[in-house]
């Protein structure tokens, strides 16, 4: 089994997923822009319609540029520019309508979250949050200072308090999202490193097997070299045994991702020996990391038979005896049908669709 090409395909699939998120973001932004334009055209006044028309045309041009550059190295910065336009549009809602009540300021929390979802990088949240904060401070400061003539529907002190709360919320959201994305990326990097090490070990084992075959052919040709080659063969077999033991540990690693939360990603085919070692490895990881929640990620398993299903249930029961809550993540529909036909039930387990949902569950249930 060659894992290195699969890792390369995973990177390619991740890039494709980024492009798909950008296209979806552009489509949603276009639809929202059209809806806002239609709404203002129906209920707005003449000066509001003119202003919204200009902003809608500018936004359409920006959307076109973003779509054109979506595959280039400038895509990320164009997205920043696009979200800056969204923040600016929110800030100019007061000058356009001529009234300010602070009700739309809560929407300034959206651009940083959208940047995180679309670009999937920690720096995106910080950059867009900083841009949004600058736009908010500039435009709203000019409104409250009387430089931009608007009618203050709410008393000025209340608006100042609201503005301060929005800036504080923006900072808290930016820092929180950055920390969560950083932790998720570190966990993913650890899994990728384990996969690469496993691929290297498997390649080395194939080379050892080829060497063993060559030695066997030499043993048939010459009885005189039997003793020398036999000693060499025994040494190689001992090395292979150590490699298999290492591969077993790498195939079922216990990875801490949060305080008291560990993940055991199960990858590839699990034979009877590896299924038997599953419980011991999991319990050792729970004890070593003092975990109160353990996530069994079965996304990488091609299928789950009755033997493996019983091994997973046994491991979950053993985890409960140590005080840890087991979570099963990544059961696909075809695997669920197979388990149902075999009469295997995980009703006593917390089951989630994927690892991200499992991490969200763990965050919602901290150590007591």
Image (tube, grey):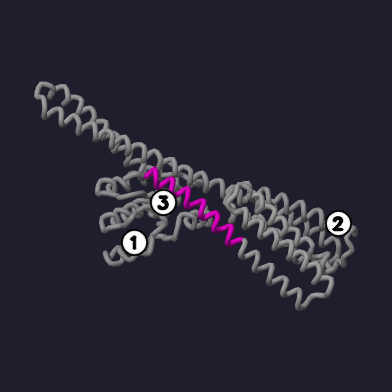
> Viewer-nearest of labels 1 and 3?
1
Task: Describe the element under mark 1 as helix, strand or loop.
Answer: helix
| Image: magenta residue range | 3-25
Sequence order check: which comes first, mark 2 or mark 1? Answer: 2
| Residue at horizontal 19 percent and vertical 28 percent from the top | 233
Inspect the magenta stretch and tell me whether residue 60 lies in it.
Answer: no
> Are dots 2 and 3 in contact, CB under 8 Å?
no
Residue 235: image location, x then y, percent: 23, 27
- Of 325 and 340, nearer the camera is 340
232 lies left or right of 130: left
Please tell me whether the stretch drawn in magenta is mainly helix, strand or loop: helix
Which residue does the numbered mark 1 point to in the structure image?
335
Which residue does the numbered mark 3 point to in the structure image?
323
Which residue does the numbered mark 2 point to in the structure image?
142
Residue 359: image location, x then y, percent: 49, 54
Label 2, label 3: how far apart the Cα atoms are: 57 Å
Callout 1: 10 Å neighbours few (<14), some, many (20+)? some
């Amino acid at each position: 089994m060659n894992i290195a090409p699969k890792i390369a395909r995973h990177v390619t699939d991740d890039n494709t997923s980024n492009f798909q998120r950008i296209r979806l973001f552009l489509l949603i932004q276009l639809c929202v822009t059209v809806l806002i334009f239609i709404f203002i055209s129906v209920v707005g006044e003449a000066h509001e319609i003119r202003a919204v028309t200009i902003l809608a045309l500018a936004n359409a041009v920006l959307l076109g540029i973003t779509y054109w550059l979506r595959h280039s190295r400038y895509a990320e910065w164009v997205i920043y520019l696009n979200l800056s336009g969204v923040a600016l549009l929110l800030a100019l809602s007061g000058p356009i309508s001529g009234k300010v009540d602070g009700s739309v300021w809560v929407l300034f929390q959206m651009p940083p979250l959208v940047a995180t979802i679309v670009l999937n990088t920690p720096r995106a949240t910080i950059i867009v949050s900083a841009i949004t904060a600058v736009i908010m401070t500039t435009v709203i400061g000019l409104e409250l200072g009387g430089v931009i003539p608007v009618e203050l529907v709410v008393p000025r002190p209340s608006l100042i308090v609201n503005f301060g709360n929005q800036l504080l919320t923006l900072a808290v959201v930016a820092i929180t999202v950055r920390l969560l994305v950083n932790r998720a990326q570190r966990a993913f990097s650890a899994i990728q490193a384990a996969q690469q090490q496993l691929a290297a070990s498997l390649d080395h084992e194939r080379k050892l097997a080829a060497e063993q075959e060559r030695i066997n052919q030499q043993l048939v040709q010459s009885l005189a070299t039997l003793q020398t080659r036999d000693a060499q063969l025994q040494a190689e077999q001992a090395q292979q045994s150590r490699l298999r033991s290492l591969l077993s540990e790498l195939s079922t690693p216990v990875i801490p991702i949060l305080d008291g939360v560990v993940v055991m990603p199960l990858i590839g085919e699990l034979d009877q020996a590896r299924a038997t070692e599953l419980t011991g490895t999991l319990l050792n990881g729970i004890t070593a990391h003092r975990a109160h929640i353990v996530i069994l990620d079965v996304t990488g398993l091609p299928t789950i038979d009755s033997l493996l299903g019983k091994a997973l249930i046994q491991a979950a029961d053993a985890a409960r005896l140590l005080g840890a809550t087991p979570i099963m993540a990544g059961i696909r529909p075809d695997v669920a049908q197979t388990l149902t036909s075999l009469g295997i039930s995980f009703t006593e387990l917390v089951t989630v669709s994927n690892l991200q949902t499992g991490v969200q569950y763990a965050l919602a249930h901290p150590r007591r």
